[in-house]
Amino acid sequence: MPDKTSNKASVAVIGAGVCGLGIAWRLAQAGRAVEVFDKGEAGRGATWAAAGMLASGVETEPGEQALLALNLAARRLWPDFVRDLEAASGIDLGYRDEGTLVVAPTRDDAEQLRFTYEFQRGLGLDLAWLNGAGARAREPHLRAGIAGAVYSAADHQVDNRQLALALKTAFLRAGGILHEHCEVTGLDMEAGAVRGLWVGEERHRAETVVLAAGPWTGALDWLPAAARAPVRPVKGQVLTLGMDPLAPLLTHVLWAPKIYLVPRRDGRLLVGATVEEKGFDETLTAGGVYELLDAAWRPLPAIEELPILETCVGFRPTSRDDAPILGASALPGLILATGHHRNGILLAPVTAEAMARLILDGETLPEARGFGPERFARRKLAAAV
Ligand code: FAD
Ligand code: GLY
């Protein structure tokens, strides 16, 4: 087979979503030669479909205490990350810090919400309980009779599509090389270690390869068994409605039973999202759209007048324990940065920082330490004993 080595890149990244691009940008900034490969257009995977919520607080569920530490590390990094990335790219990320409201339309919903609120407060999260009037004082278009609400001042949002564009721009400005429409078809191995990758017949050498293929990670049949990661796609259908940007229906991110709504400054209102175990099924369904509109209309009836601007189907990269997979694989030279499930946008800065440090200094961030791929092998061993 002819060796079409194009470049002696020091680092090659598979996947140009927020995770791959974030790591690549940080490494390029640090002076490393970095090439990123994507089978499609950069930023068009899970990153495109997301809502951009930075929900480090209100999405926390029982059993996610370790993940919370990572989420909070990401929350701390966000303001500086926005400043650095906007300066490096010249692109506005649409970062909004009005906070998030979780509303309970009925008394039953309020009891459930009170339970979640007490649990999250017990973890030290700074949340405030509001009555219906308090919620409507913040969002006057909410239906009358809201039974209760929780306000999180620290759960912000970003425009994830602008984020991807900014990361791509900053990466290119820092000297990185991006190969779009270049599907990686194999790893280049030498004496049991990864020395680069293959795009068809073309070999690209690299000292380190980062696998950041999002929801496709578990479907890469060319990956040696030792490096396989348990990641599957979890489908989400999302609608975008159009508000008048000068008189928007919402300013906070809003959660209600089975739904979230995310208002953008330009008037777009994202309504998401279904959670479906359907593999890579890209169908937009009547049931999905009905479920979203019905659940959104209950707290915010005025949406019925809004035009539908866009429909979208995306896939969350979901690992077996719903937490990201961040660290060195069992194959020397291969790093995994995948499995970010519902929080990959929130975790983008901490993923970039942790993986760049691992590659540059051999040490990851303390908060990322428990999230290496070896945890799945340990569990398999423990189950076998
Ligand atoms: P991706 O963005 O999917 O990037 C992976 C890239 O790898 C793709 O571009 C793909 O083309 C490329 N690739 C795959 N295989 C190959 C190959 N063989 N060769 C070359 N390239 C390859 N997270 C939040 O934090 N907040 C939210 O509000 C939020 N909302 C969401 C709503 C929905 C409906 C969905 C689906 C997800 C949501 N998420 C949210 C999750 C978030 O979108 C993901 O966790 C995050 O985008 C993952 O980024 P990534 O870079 O790992 O994956
Ligand atoms: N984090 C929102 C979602 O995954 O739908």
Image (tube, rainbow, N blue to C red):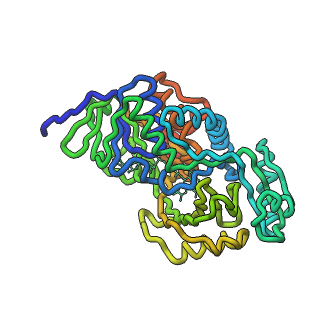
Residue 125 pos. (x, y %): 76, 44
Q: Is 172 in front, or is 349?
A: 172
**Residue occupying the point 44% across, 70% down:** 283
Residue 331 shows up from this direction: no
Q: Position of residue 122 (x, y in %)?
A: 80, 46
Residue 110 seen anywhere in this rendered image of the structure? yes
Is residue 8 rendered to the left or right of residue 83? left
Q: Where 68 sits versus 11, above or below?
A: below
- Is residue 302 shown above or below 367? below
**For residue 3, side relative to residue 211 (left or right):** left
Residue 140 rendering spot, x and y as whole percentages: 78, 63
Q: Residue at x 54, y 72 (%)?
A: 288
Q: Which residue corresponds to the image point at 50% horizontal and 27% vertical from the top-left?
A: 357
Reply above or below: 164 against 240.
Answer: above
Q: Nearer the viewer, residue 255 or 64?
A: 255
Residue drawn at (75%, 66%) of the image: 141
